[in-house]
Amino acid sequence: MKEFISTPRLSTYKSLLKLKTDEHALRAYYWNKALSGALYPALQALEVTLRNALNEAVKNAHSGNYANEDWWFEHIAKDVQDTKIRKMHANKSKHWIKADGNGGVKRKKHSYFEQQVLKVQKDLRNEGRTPIRHDDVLSRLGPESKIYKRRLRAISQ
């Protein structure tokens, strides 16, 4: 098996662990693989538990539009972007809004986060996962994504 693992890979183990032989480096490599495999189920459970806890915390921490709302992340994304647009200089906001023909305005485009939510929903539809559930969307926007972190920061301010 040693011939299939690159010398630079084994050298990393030898260097970091101060190992003398390729045999010891190979054993360390296999040990690392076994350890990673053993930890993976626990990390998966932690990720799901954390995401569900964050979801419930956001739903329960807000009154008004987001209280007990499964799709809170869509509402927050729209509200955050609408607030940003209202605060923009007219020259900049014209890239985001247009007249709707009834004396009001209509959004021309979506924020990055809104686009990501729409993309996830489209991906789920393409996979035949209908009806689309909020928890399926959230799982694709998980805490490892910069989108999720940015939105949580925005709502906590």
Image (cartoon, grey):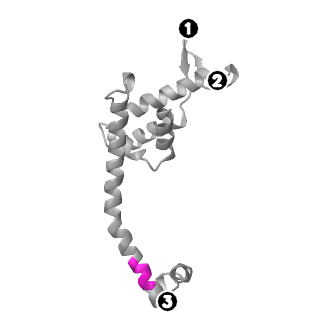
Location of residue 111 by image quarter: top right
Identify the residue position indicated by label 2 in the image: 88
In percent of the image, x 37 and y 35: which residue is there?
58
* Residue 103 - label: 1
Mark 1 and mark 2: Cα distance apart in space: 20 Å
- Which dot, 1 or 3, sits closer to the camera? 3
For label 3, the crowd category at 10 Å Cα-Cα, with few meaning under 14, some 14 to 19 and many 20 or more, is some
Q: Nearer the viewer, residue 33 or 3?
A: 33
**Are circles 2 and 3 on residues that touch, CB within 8 Å?**
no
- Which dot, 1 or 2, sits closer to the camera? 2
Q: Amino acid at mark 3?
A: Asp
Location of residue 109 by image quarter: top right
State the extent of the magenta-drawn residues as a range. Answer: 26-31
Q: Position of residue 95 (x, y in %)?
A: 64, 26
In the picture shown, does residue 56 fall above or below 50? above
Mark 2 and mark 3: Cα distance apart in space: 61 Å
Sequence-wise first label, 2 or 3: 3
Location of residue 51 by image quarter: top left
Identify the residue position indicated by label 3 in the image: 22
Helix, strand or loop at mark 1: loop
